Image (cartoon, rainbow, N blue to C red):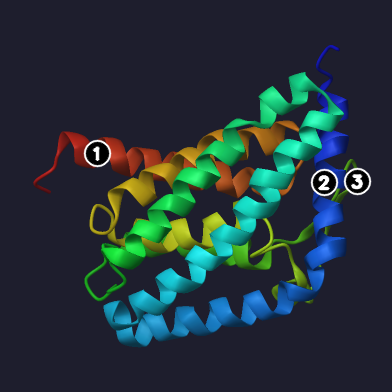
Amino acid sequence: MTFSPQVFGEGFHRFVQTEYQLFGFLSPYVHIIALVLLVLVCILGNKIRRVFTLYFALNWLFLFGYWGVYGVIYWFHVGLPYLLTYIFAPILLLLILLQWLKEIKRPQIHLDFSDVNPFRFSVLLILIWGFWYPAYQYGQGFVVQASDLLFSYFGLMPCPTTMFVLSLFSLNYPKGNPALFHLMTAYAVFIGTATVASGWLADVPFILLGLYGWILILFYKKHPSV
């Protein structure tokens, strides 16, 4: 069996649609919880990080269950070349999940944004995009509607969920959990590029966020005392 980008793209979109048919009823709940957490973070900062961590650890457990475990089964049945193309995603999801679980025991994330450089707040545009994540019809384009502020794939797909969290973490980097930041940045660059290549254009901002995270990592590696 040879690899076909069109088959991969169509298979990816069917995979996403199946998830929404099964779990789309959760969408408004995960949106509301995330929004409440964001407000609490703005008010309480690190005092709320334990709750923040517990929630997103559970969220990533769900993401790994569908996009990791079931994803491997799904692509195995499509064909080995497609599984090998996809396999990097569940590996990264597992590593991110393990970091969230470690974070529960040893808190490192930094959610106090009182001394953030104002320039960095521009990344919140990508956070908003991830939370909203307008519906995208394969081969047709975006369907922009306000209802996606409650009913989008945020919380159900790793990409928009990572956009939300990684945008927040980038405000304070290098403060926080470096391993979690690095893994999410890798996910944004590599998986974001793969999904856009498959025709899922909603992840273009995800790639930009990943490149921004990569720049931050390289900068602070060269200038650790800044």
First reached walking from the N terminus: tag 3 or tag 2: 2
The kind of residue on which mark 3 rests is: Gln
The image quadrant where one finds the N terminus is top right
Query: Which residue does the image show at 57% across and 47% down from the upper left?
Result: 206
Q: Is residue 121 above or below residue 140?
A: below
Q: Is residue 123 visible?
A: no
**Distance from the alpha carbon under mark 1 to that under mark 3:** 39 Å
Mark 3 vs 2: CB contact within 8 A: no
In the picture, the disc for residue 140 is 3
Horizontal and vertical percent for residue 95? 46, 44
Q: CA distance from mark 1 to mark 2?
A: 37 Å
Query: Disc 2 designates what residue?
Result: 15
| 85 vs 178: above or below | above
Drawn side of residue 184 relative to residue 65, left or right: left
Residue pictured at 75% horizontal, 42% vertical: 200
Of tags 3 and 2, the one toward the viewer is: 2
Closer to the observer: label 1 or label 2?
A: 2
Mark 1 and mark 2 lie on one chain; the one further toward the N terminus is 2
The crowd level at tag 2 (other Cα within 10 Å; few <14, some 14-19, many 20+) is: some
Q: Secondary structure beneath disc 3?
A: loop
